[in-house]
Image (cartoon, helix red, strand yellow):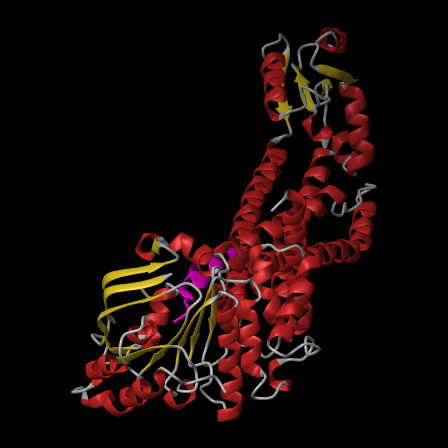
Amino acid sequence: MNIGAYFARHAQVLVGSLGRIAQQPLAAMMTMAVIGVALALPLLLNVFLQNARIASGNLTTAFDLSVYMDKRADTARAQALAKQLRLRGDVASVRVIPADQALAEFRSGSGFGKALDALKDNPLPDTLVVTPTLDAGTPQGTETLKAAIAAMPDVQIVQLDTEWVKRLQAILEVVRHGVLLTAALLGAGVILVVSNTIRLDILNRRAEIEVMKLVGASDGFTRRPFLYAGIWYGLGGGLLAVVLVTAGTLFLSEPVAHLALLYGSDFRLEGLEFVTMLEVLGAAAALAWAGSWLAVRRHIRAIEPA
Amino acid sequence: MIRFDQVHKRYPNGREALAGVSFAVQSGELAFLTGHSGAGKSSILKLIALIERPTRGQVIVNDRNIASIKARGIAQFRRQIGMVFQDHKLLHDRPVMDHVALPLIIAGVPRRDIDKRVRAALDQVGLLGKEKLRPLELSTGEQPRVGIARAVVARPSLLIADEPTGNLDPDLAREVMLLFKRFSEVGVTVVVATHDVHLIERFDARRVLLSEGRVILDSHAIVEGRSVAEGRSVAEGRSVAEGRADAGGRDGGDAKPS
């Protein structure tokens, strides 16, 4: 048999197996629905995770360092230090907040004006707000910067407000592992569901398989329609998952945008990318193929003419 | 073409179906395996088609000791054999066309040739024009012909049939047997297992009578020109098949297909 005929035969079986599925649309749709829902869940979680990462990635200001000067040093010293820091490669900008200005801001902003009047001295030190460059804006980078600044003369305290960012990222990491675990479990579920569907399919077509074997069909020939049926189930289920997740993100995008707006952000929920959709379809087809392979391996061999 | 040499077959349940069977069928010969049910007819066909393996002894098919064929080679081996079954093994949801095309599809025959060859095979069994019908839409006499067309469409060198006339009335049964005879006349080796002695009496063909897993009469003797009496004497003294063997021996030499 030449290559062309070989592909023609496979294409024929591929289309034939789709035709068979179409003959029992309800049963096939049930299987696809199970696959679709099983895949939609981790996929949707993953969409949220991706969005949470994008959102948390926008929080570069969270990596700013607050440098509180020694009370004994004057503002000129703070200015000098700022100048020195601006020369560093990992510093993007430095803003100096003199103690007086800080007190004024606090007075107007906090509502403690009267109480502050009771104080003899300004209790606030001069402050530098140091923003690291984008490259140095990682937890490790800022940590290095923090240590360097803390070692400088006249610096009282360097405060790094990254603790909660670290925690958020740790939480996202936990969630990510959770998503992976869920995906693995539900992926195994897809394999089992397809395997079971194909098993029933094989048992229903027992007579046909027996006849095929009697007239000299090889195991490969007998298996093929079932393997292709598995791929169709997977593609159908994958398509459904993509539709479900896209619908889900559309459903949520409006309230999320509104919420973001309340926080002064123009953040928008990102749906599935086209490439991701293709990946989902591919993964679904591969899982379903694996499932049908399991069923075919066991059950077609078991059918022997007698 | 086919040679059985001291073949024994004992099934896992302990039943001994064949107890030292030896016979040979020449290329292009038509041979009937007869005997009561349970005599071992079906077992012989199953051994030929590698549906079962012998417990002991040799089976040679097409000059090949089939013990040498491993599980992987069975499919390929079966493509040289056309098989017809008592229950026809037809699929009720498939049209006649699909049934008969199956062996050709398996053999990788190009699509454009399949149609032509299916029609030719259907023509041979008298079912031309019924390609689109499903088995249940055919008459009882037509159903086994679908199985026969399927068995011959890939032009096997060997055709085996197990009780192909099982449920047919005598006229239809005779027509089916005539089909087998016709295939043997064009060079196909045909082995038919049947309990219907009266039917095959009318055919001038080889007869192998089995009883309790043994060959008790082989009309091969007649084919090779030995006396009828010799064949008969083998049968005598075996009470189980005596009457039938007698009938077979008496008419074996001069019966004509009618």
Residue B78 in percent (x, y) is at 45, 61
* Residue A131 pos. (x, y %): 73, 21
Q: Can residue A200 be seen by looking at this rendering?
A: no
**Residue A138, position in %: x, y?**
64, 25
Q: Which residue occupies 53% across, 78% down?
A: B179
Q: Chief secondary structure of the magenta span?
A: helix
Q: Is residue B160 left or right of residue B12?
A: right
Position above or below: B201 against A155: below
Q: Which residue appears at 52% of the width and 60% of the height?
A: A222
In this figure, what is the number of numbered marks? 0
> Quadrant of the rendered structure where residue A237 is?
bottom right
When the figure is inspected, residue A144 is found, relative to residue B155, above or below; the finding is: above
**Looking at the image, which residue is at 37% across and 63% down?**
B50
Q: Give the quadrant of residue B240.
A: bottom left
Choose between B254 and B134: the one closer to the eye: B254
Q: Is residue A305 magenta?
A: yes
Which quadrant does the C terminus of chain A fall into?
bottom left
Front-most of residues A123 and A162? A162
The foreground one among B98 and B148 is B148
Q: Is residue A170 among the parts visible in the rendering?
A: yes
Q: Is residue A181 left or right of residue A127?
A: left
Tell me which segment is drawn in magenta: A292-306
Query: A156 or A299: which is nearer to us?
Result: A299
The verdict on residue B87 being magenta is no
Q: From the viewer's perspective, is A206 left or right of B54?
A: right
